[in-house]
């Protein structure tokens, strides 16, 4: 089975720090789609990388998947 994770930011703009809507969902090869999280955050967190994507994904999938450290981890 393949698993595709999509993170969508709605109305993201470099010129603005207005809150944006973020939707995280995954779809498997059977076409099943599950929305894991839908929230709002300030754009500067996206652009500055203050919420690390790896940590965010671990929070979203903590009950579904096991995460293993890699040699490339910081």
Image (tube, helix red, strand yellow):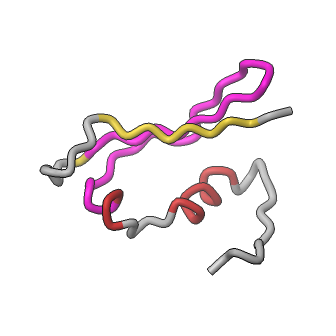
Judged from this view, the residue extending furthest toward the bottom is 74
- Pinpoint residue 53: horizontal percent, then vertical percent: 52, 60
Q: Residue at x 78, y 24 (%)?
A: 29
Examine the image and state in which quarter residue 43 appears.
bottom left
Q: Residue at x 49, y 66 (%)?
A: 52
- Asked if residue 49 lies left or right of residue 5, the reply is left
Q: Which residues are magenta?
A: 20-45
Q: Is residue 6 above or below residue 57?
A: above
Magenta stretch, main secondary structure class: strand
- Pinpoint residue 23: horizontal percent, then vertical percent: 46, 38
Seen from the viewer's position, the closer of residues 70 and 32 is 70
Does 26 appear in magenta?
A: yes
Q: Residue at x 28, y 43 (%)?
A: 20
- Work out which quarter of the rendered image holds the N terminus and state it: top right
- Asked if residue 70 lies left or right of residue 6, the reply is right
Does 64 appear in magenta?
A: no
How many numbered circles does the render carry? 0
- Pinpoint residue 58: horizontal percent, then vertical percent: 64, 59
Q: Residue at x 76, y 77 (%)?
A: 71
- Pinpoint residue 36: horizontal percent, then vertical percent: 58, 40
């Amino acid at each position: 089975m393949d698993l595709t994770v999509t993170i969508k930011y709605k109305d993201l703009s470099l010129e603005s720090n207005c809150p944006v809507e973020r939707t995280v969902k995954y779809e498997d090869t059977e076409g099943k789609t599950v929305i894991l999280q839908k929230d709002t955050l300030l754009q500067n967190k996206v652009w500055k990388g203050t919420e690390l994507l790896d940590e965010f994904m671990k929070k979203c999938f903590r009950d579904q998947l096991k995460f293993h450290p890699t040699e490339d981890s910081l």
